[in-house]
Image (cartoon, rainbow, N blue to C red):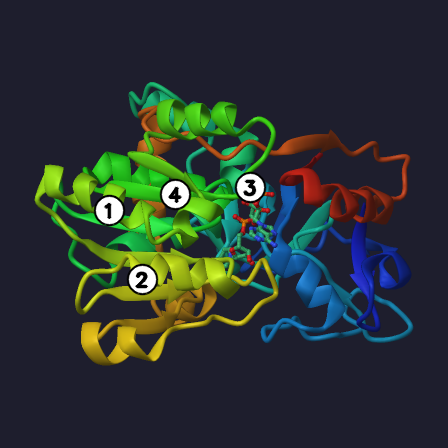
Amino acid sequence: MITAQAVVYAQHGEPKDVLKTHKYEIDDDNLDSNSIIVKTLGSPVNPSDINQIQGVYPSKPEKTTELGSSEPIAVCGNEGLFEIVKVGKNVSNFKEGDWCVPSAVNMGTWRTHMLCGSEEMTKIPNPEQSKANGKPNGLSINQGATISVNPLTAYLMLTHYVKLTPGKDWFIQNGGNSAVGKYATQISNLLGINSISVVRDRENLQELIKDLTEECGATKVITEEQNASKEFGSEIKSWLKETGGEIKLALNCVGGKNSTGIARKLSNNGLMLTYGGMSMQPVILPTSLHIFKNITSSGFWVTQLLKNDMELKRKTLNQIIEWYENGQLKDAPSKETKFNSNDDLSKYYIDGIVNSKGGKQLIVY
Ligand code: NDP
């Protein structure tokens, strides 16, 4: 028997009020032939996990009594990295020691162990396998645990909708310092696309600009004030002139005036994809941009895009894995906290949620 812990909620609400630890047993001596048992290597706290607990996220896990609870509960967390500890006798796609990530969302990744069907997990190479395949690097726990959402989001937004010509064209984004934003910057750099990242002003702005340009390969980094300034528009036009390209794509995770600013920079027929709303303000778009520049404003939700397209998910995952293995892509760093199995698991994630305002939190096991 494996004694497992999971962070669960029975009612939606503020995480500190509704999260608790549920302990349950997994019978590893009587494993169903098509099932697998995995242990968690790491799972992050993402903004959508918090919204899900609060009950304000459209995709929600079903609450059940499957884990032996007295009332229906749901296990928190959507992303994570797992290692196979046992496979059923008919399972051919996994063996002990393999690494995997959930094939879909809502699997409940904030837990120590999971019993699931083998098709519910997608294999990714563990470091020994990468090495055996002649790759210079194996994936780190952070890279594996955060691979399913942010890098895929960045890659798909940059490649799936608008054809950007390498060496010429540009995209603009706000939230340039977000995890998704940093992936988008690095990936655009790998694809030869020019980028403008809008960031909030801060005391160490020059340090941030240096980091985004030198470490992530951002072409240009501007502040929210510059994004809002009419005068600064001529500076941006001069950058475009240098490459002979256009800003055909805007990525918006902030909303409010910030989104107006980036939409204004789009060329005729440009597209703005809204994938987040960090300022909690609505997207504001001047009528003239629609009529005279024919810009399109659309939403992006990685969950919905990949839900019924496993082939696109596998293809995108493979590309991100390859860049990680070749050392071409850096993961957005997380603050890692190691779980001590004598402790109460929910406390780690409740602290992680509080601390996530200061950067991405990853609980490692
Ligand atoms: P991070 O926690 O890494 O970053 C959050 C970013 O938001 C930071 O850059 C922060 O700026 C910025 N920010 C916070 N509040 C404000 C504000 N009031 N005004 C301007 N900027 C603000 O987040 P992630 O990269 O994990 O996620 C970013 C967004 O993308 C979230 O909304 C998330 O839900 C969404 N998302 C959506 C997906 C989809 O499929 N639709 C998939 C993945 C993520 P600063 O550095 O200045 O603090």
- Do callouts 2 and 4 mark residues in contact (Cβ within 8 Å)? no
Q: Secondary structure at mark 4?
A: strand
Element on which disc 1 rests: helix
* Foreground: disc 2 or disc 4: 2
| Separation of residues labelled 1 and 4 (CA atoms) | 17 Å
Of discs 2 and 3, which sits in the foreground?
Answer: 2
Among numbered discs 2 and 4, the one appearing first in the sequence:
4
Rounded to the nearest angstrom, the CA distance separating label 2 from label 4 is: 14 Å
> Residue placed farthest to the front in the image?
231
Q: Secondary structure at mark 2?
A: helix
Q: Amino acid under label 2?
A: Arg
Distance from disc 2 to disc 3, alpha carbons, whole Å, reads 36 Å
Q: Residues within 10 Å of mark 1 (few under 14, many from 20)?
A: few
Disc 1 to disc 2, how far (Cα)?
13 Å
Q: How far from the left and from the top, in percent, is residue 81?
A: 57, 42
On residue 234, the disc is: 1
Q: 53 or 169: which is nearer to us? A: 169
Alpha-carbon neighbours of circle 4 within 10 Å: few (<14), some, or many (≥20)?
many
Give the residue at mark 4: 197
Label drawn at residue 264: 2
Q: Residues within 10 Å of mark 2 (few under 14, many from 20)?
A: many
Three-letter residue code for mark 3: Ala
224 vs 68: above or below: above
Residue at which label 3 appears: 145
